[in-house]
Image: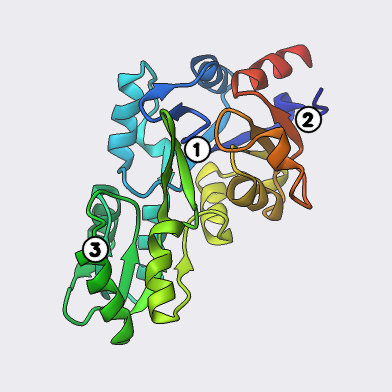
Amino acid sequence: MSTLNFNEKTGFICDMDGVIYKGNQILPGVTEFIQWLQEENKEYLFLTNNSGYTPRELNQKLERMGLDVPEEHFYTSALATAAFLKDQAPGCSVFAIGEAGLLNALYDAGITMNDVNPDYVVVGEGRSYSLDSLTKATNLVMGGAKLIGANSDVSGPIEGGIAPACRALISPIEMATGTQAYFCGKPNPLMMRTGLRMLHCHSADAVMIGDRMDTDIISGMESGMSTVLVLSGCSTLETLKTYAYRPSAVVDGVGDIVSLARAMK
């Protein structure tokens, strides 16, 4: 049983895929978890490496599952990527492979699209990924564009299995060009620091909840937060054994956090 006292924590940063839902299927205990966060007046943020959705779309997706979570409680790797590029090269241009979440974030940050001589090639997840776009991106990088990945997830959980994610999709460009991409999502400390700022919370008072050791748990740990690994997504107790670091707690799903918190009151 976990010795982590969730009642003492003021801020909760939570992954989404494999923690809140798989595909379009809500996971057990999620409704109770969100009710507990709201009833206990906890600061909370859903921090997702999925670059395909806008905060409004995530709000609507959860709404369809019967959950009421306002837009300001979402921060995505697409927003982190746009913020990074705006800081590094204001007004730059990009060739982007991705969905509305990534494209809207880039536009909102004053970044323009350019398929001739962009400053950056930016890759996220999405249905626009094709051999043609891959070839175009490869040659733009060969021509001098810098390569950016929205996140470093190799795969993500879906109903019935897994789907290749950004790290897997960008690797052909890296291999063809001999270039290493820079990734803006978890476990990049820039994204975690932004999340803590949005919560107005010190890392010692915050908890990171996720289903991946290589992004969620390491990013929380390296940011000084307590960490909770849920077994409802990508990780199992067997995969946990392969890592040199450990989460503060391991639970089957987020509903267990509510049970543990109430048991410690």
If the image is split into quadrants, where does the C terminus sit? Answer: top right
- Displayed quadrant of residue 129: bottom left
Q: Position of residue 163 (x, y in %)?
A: 41, 43
**Above or below for 86 versus 24:** below
**Above or below for 119 versus 54:** below
The answer to which of marks 2 and 3 sits earlier in the sequence is: 2
If the image is split into quadrants, where does the N terminus sit? Answer: top right
Pointer 2 residue:
4
User: Which one is closest to the eye, mark 2 or mark 3?
Assistant: 3
Question: What residue is drawn where x is 67% and y is 51%?
Answer: 218
Disc ID at residue 131: 3
In the displayed structure image, the side of residue 74 where residue 232 appears, left or right: right
Q: Position of residue 70 (x, y in %)?
A: 37, 30
**Residues at marks 2 and 3 touching, judged by CB atoms closer than 8 Å:** no
The amino acid on which the numbered mark 3 sits, given as a three-letter code, is Leu
The amino acid on which the numbered mark 1 sits, given as a three-letter code, is Leu
Pointer 1 residue:
45
Q: Position of residue 220 (x, y in %)?
A: 65, 48
The amino acid on which the numbered mark 2 sits, given as a three-letter code, is Leu
User: Which one is closest to the eye, mark 3 or mark 1?
Assistant: 3
Question: What residue is drawn where x is 31% and y is 71%?
Answer: 121
Question: What residue is drawn where x is 35% and y is 61%?
Answer: 82
- CA gap, disc 3 and disc 1: 36 Å
In the displayed structure image, the side of residue 5 where residue 69 appears, left or right: left
Question: What residue is drawn where x is 71% and y is 27%?
Answer: 6
